[in-house]
Image (cartoon, helix red, strand yellow):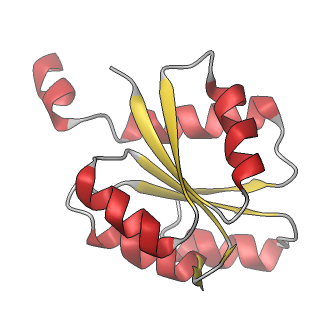
Amino acid sequence: MRSRILFVSGHPDDACRLSQMLQPLPLALDHAEDLRHARAQLQRREYHVILAEAALPDGNWLDALRLARECPHNPELIVTCAHADARFWAEALNMGVYDLLAQPFYDAEVRRILHNACSRRAPQSSAMAAV
């Protein structure tokens, strides 16, 4: 079973690039252009991870964190930012973000972080079958 990732970004080119990076892995990436669209997708489908840009067309990473916490299946949140400093990283991690991804994206780092986050959020049915 493929783990699902919801990428929330106003940049569709980044979504295309991420999809290409993830092709070798059992990970599927969907794209939402803003938080409003992300909320609608989260109501229709279960995602293991939400990958959101720090600055979004209709909010920011804190709004994405609130959205993730509202989900009954508890997806991990990973924030991506081109201009993150150590203070921002520490704040985000302390608030409950799983990890941060710097931009521009580095293939190996993207694959490692997203794969690890999805592994932590394996569907309950799979986890129960292993017990």
The quadrant in which the C terminus is found is top left
The x and y percentages for residue 85 are 85, 73
In this rendering, is residue 8 above or below 104? below
In this rendering, is residue 33 above or below 31? below
In this rendering, is residue 98 above or below 17? below
Query: Residue at coordinates 80% horizontally, 55% vertically from top-left?
Result: 102
The residue nearer to you, when weighing 23 against 31, is: 31
The residue nearer to you, when weighing 128 against 41, is: 41
**Rendering quarter of residue 53:** bottom right
The x and y percentages for residue 88 are 74, 77
Query: Residue at coordinates 57% horizontally, 39% vertically from top-left?
Result: 114
The quadrant in which the N terminus is found is top left
- Compared across the picture, whether 121 is left or right of 59 comes to left
Query: Residue at coordinates 62% horizontally, 15% vertically from top-left?
Result: 24
In this rendering, is residue 109 above or below 50? above
The x and y percentages for residue 33 are 58, 64
**Rendering quarter of residue 107:** top right
